Image (cartoon, rainbow, N blue to C red):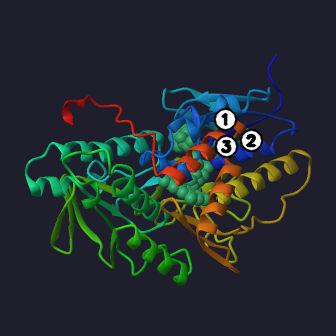
Amino acid sequence: MSDRRHHVVIVGAGFGGLEVARGLAGAPVRITLIDQRNHHLFQPLLYQVATASLAPSEIAWPIRHLFRSRKEVTTLLAAVSGIDAQSNQLHLADGTLIAYDTLVLATGARHAYFGHDEWESRAPGLKTLEDATAIRRQILLAFERAEREADPQQRAALLTFVIVGGGPTGVELAGTIAELAHTTLRKEFRIIDTRTARIILIEAGGRLLPSFSADLSSYARTALERLGVEIALGHPVGECTSDGVMVEGRKIPAAVTLWAAGVRASPAAAWLDAPTDPANRVRVEPNLSAPGHANVFVIGDTATIDAWQGRPVPGIAPAAKQQGRYVAHVITRRLRGGDASQPFRYRHAGSLATIGKRSAIIDLGWISVRGWIAWWLWGLTHIYFLIGVRNRLSVALSWLWIYATGDRSARLITQEQHRSA
Ligand SMILES: Cc1cc2nc3c(=O)[nH]c(=O)nc-3n(C[C@H](O)[C@H](O)[C@H](O)COP(=O)(O)OP(=O)(O)OC[C@H]3O[C@@H](n4cnc5c(N)ncnc54)[C@H](O)[C@@H]3O)c2cc1C
């Protein structure tokens, strides 16, 4: 017998999509949750996998396992490639069609290269576990190659790490790579002195962390410089090459260039032929539905709406979660015969960023915290938001170990034969 319950299809099991599925618990629906990956990823800690502080399994969970006791939720590992909104059907990349009554698109964003997609292979960005382990390999291989490099210039280039973009991810990567080079690896190499490594953070704007107050941004700058990071502000990168970057006509030779400078939303807007902002985010209605499609919602990093006291909602995890909860509420109300609820309003709890293993900044708007107290608060907050007791304990233990000893144990070079070292 066919299942006549209202069918909600959620695409994307990131922060937004998971929250929709959670919010629909107990509603008279069946849910199909589709993701092109089999795991939910805690992206705020990805940089710690990229810098060998945490293992991939500490920040990712099989989606299927998360919904094991929710019989009405079916999880599918598949990539969505399009939508036929007229017939309420979703196209999967393998040609399968899936019919829906209500659709929620929570497909996130990826890094963007401002029209220079060819830079991606030379300056990888951080979005997936594969990105993180590939970056980890690149960083660790650079030290290995430097140990065997006789030419001083080549060696210096191998020990130069450029990070493009002075937002939270760029700052967190720069601080942690500096600690890795200057502390963690210091005693393990015999020929090179890893403390001579240069970590250069390049930001096109006038200051780091523009989403934080000017005061906290200047604190972050000083804290990074204390860790040995060189900071170049007001300098857009003109070119990323396979062996470095060009900045205002000057070449900086570097074995590793990392990209943390911009995002572009998933192609959800093209699937719906919907209006977008310059980052390709769908301009959604006040109730987060797509224009002209009352039964299609778009949330999280792939949507844009001026619902933060008239400003655009930021592309951060709490915003995606709030939107997910809101959409679950709207769907439930509709099914129970109620009218649409209040327009979505974003409530900003605060902004956080770490600078190495002992310092952080927290901007709550009405108060700011910095230094080691902020680091502990940052750590506790992130542990609270991780899923499951085992991961919380494991991450807490890893951090305490790093905090006390400076040792980062996830220093594995994987996915490549050592011949290239
Ligand atoms: C390196 C990094 C650091 C960050 N740090 C912070 C931080 O410190 N604090 C903070 O609040 N936010 C941070 N963010 C931002 C935060 O992670 C995002 O705002 C949040 O993940 C957005 O949630 P989402 O549900 O919109 O998308 P995501 O969480 O990105 O989830 C999208 C999901 O959709 C799936 N998907 C995409 N396309 C398809 C398709 N075609 N078919 C099927 N599935 C698909 C993806 O596999 C993914 O699982 C960071 C992001 C990154 C990349």
Q: Residue at x 59, y 67 (%)?
A: 372
User: Hey, which residue is sitting farthest top in the picture?
Assistant: 1
In this rendering, which labeled residue sits more in front, label 2 or label 3?
3
Q: Tell me, yes or no, if residue 268 can be seen here.
A: no
> Which is nearer the N-term, disc 1 or disc 3?
1
Which amino acid, by three-letter code, is at mark 3?
Arg
Task: Work out whether residue 292 or residue 400 is closer to the camera in this orientation and state it.
Answer: 400
Residue behind label 3 places its C-beta within 8 angstroms of ligand 1:
no
- Amino acid type at circle 2 is Ala
Q: Which residue is mark 2?
A: 21
- Helix, strand or loop at mark 2: helix
Please tell me whether mark 1 or mark 3 is closer to you in this view: 3
The quadrant the N terminus occupies is top right
Q: Horizontally, is 284 left or right of 182 in the view?
A: right
Callout 2 touching callout 3 (CB < 8 Å): no
Q: Residue at x 72, y 58 (%)?
A: 322
> Residue 138: horizontal and vertical position, in percent?
30, 44
For the question of whether residue 235 can be seen, the reply is yes
Mark count: 3
What's the mark number on residue 33? 1
Q: Position of residue 305 (x, y in %)?
A: 63, 67
